[in-house]
Image (cartoon, rainbow, N blue to C red):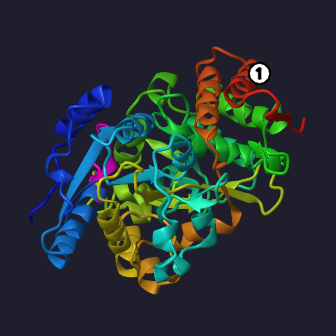
Amino acid sequence: MRTRLLAATAVAAVTTVCAATLSGCGSGSGSSGKTIKVVYQQQLNNSNKVQAGFLGPMVEQFEKANPGTTVKLVPVTASENDYYTKIQLMMRSPATAPDMVYEDTATINSDVAGGYLKPLDSYLNTWQDWGSFAAPAKAAMKYAPDGKTYGVPDNTDTRGIWYNKQLFAQAGIAVPWQPKTWADVLTAARTVKAKVPGVTPLNVYTGVAGGEASSMQGFEMLLYGTPAANDSLYDTKQQKWVVGSKGFKDALGFVHTVFGEGLGPSAQQALGANFQAAVGTEMIPQGKLAIDIDGSWMPNNWIRTGPKPWPQWQTTMGMAAMPTQNGQGSGKVSMSGGWAWSIPAKAKNPDLAWKFTQFLESKANSARWNSVNATIAVRTDVATDPTYLKALPTNEFFSALVPDTFYRPGLPAYTQVSSAIQKAMEAVTTGQSSVDKAAGTYDSDVKTAVGDGKTVQGAR
């Protein structure tokens, strides 16, 4: 099969040079009106090529249906945080800007504020399929100051708890397992530690190297499950960032307990740059991790085309909703994010990029992508499709978490707030700071990031 994928290492090198100079890296044949460059992320040191495997055939089909066109796929090999930085550097100059870029929904607003993205309203107004996208997913594409839309959502996700049923059996924990409180989660982890030596009882992503995985899977899954969840990160009514809340300290306290009691991986292991990949491709398949707070996409690692094909995952792994702190409210909590296709403001061929976006996000191709990528559909007609629901045995479970999910504040300052969260987590993970001290540092960091008068005292 013919493919237009560039070698990952070569792309990383070219990207670095282009970003550093912002000149001298012209698009070559990409300057043609019949050629577009499409940028997406390839995780650092991760053999997961699911997106590459999907996009390759899509390019072939599109080029065949549109004779004379060329779609160049440019995978940028980087961690999440580095990817955000690299694409921003690429989008600063017409010489390096791609025509399409894969955007984390959490960073769209900051990239719009930086002048990097093109509004898509003129295209969307005449695209009938836009009415088939879920309202929350579409809302995440809007930039509040101008009300315009800057991306087409490609997928969403939810988060819960994965647990190894075989390890639970060895520990004497009954399955199916559904904890009702944080205490139940910790009790199960302590039981595993006592009865199944050599196994990591519980994984909570943490620290700066973990990037957004630390913020969302590791921290916000806790924070948004506290009784004061409505003002946990950002008070929408007052339009201010929340500091000094009890919920924030309670979430940090959970992290402190996990690592302080040795219920998680070692701090050195947890703070490693490649730990997230190791969880999915090594620790879980090898039976070395009992409980993992993680996302709906985890089967990507284990399906036939994933980096660690593992047919036994369907019988080995169980799923549970993440409980709220004390079982309050609905008793469960999830976080949602996702990715979108956007067109940079300095794209040379936005019209052709839009045509390719429409092609990727058609009902048929969207259903295919969400099925192979183990992500939650953003098109309502795909989300109710029996074929999609049956594509993976986990789709129904994780789709059912949507009513209890939360979304990160779609504001430019979120990336700085997220970094402050990761810093606070790392401080309590290593034991270098107490919960109170780390929370105080977070408050100071947020106040510095968002400016005077942009914070409010949270519930105590």
Relative depth, front residue between 388 and 183: 388
Q: Residue at x 22, y 72 (%)?
A: 62
Q: How many marks?
A: 1
- Residue 446: image quadrant is top right
Give the residues in magenta.
38-50
Q: Residue at x 45, y 34 (%)?
A: 198
Q: Residues within 10 Å of mark 1 (few under 14, many from 20)?
A: some
Relative depth, front residue between 357 and 262: 357
**Could you say where residue 142 lies in the image, as x and y percent from the top left?**
60, 59
Considering the image in quadrants, where does the C terminus appear? Answer: top right
**Could you say where residue 217 lies in the image, as x and y percent from the top left?**
57, 45
**Could you say where residue 438 lies in the image, as x and y percent from the top left?**
71, 21
What amino acid type should be assigned to the residue bearing mark 1?
Gly
Q: Which residue is mark 1?
A: 440
Relative depth, front residue between 434 and 258: 434
Q: Residue at x 17, y 69 (%)?
A: 60
Relative depth, front residue between 33 and 139: 33
Residue at the limit of the structure toward the right, as seen here? 460
**Could you say where residue 157 lies in the image, as x and y percent from the top left?**
53, 60
Left or right of 388, for residue 192: right
Residue at the limit of the structure toward the top, as seen here? 432
Q: Label 1: state its secondary structure.
A: helix
Question: Is residue 216 highlighted in magenta?
Answer: no
Considering the image in quadrants, where does the N terminus appear? Answer: bottom left
262 in relation to 164, above or below: above
Q: Residue at x 46, y 85 (%)?
A: 386
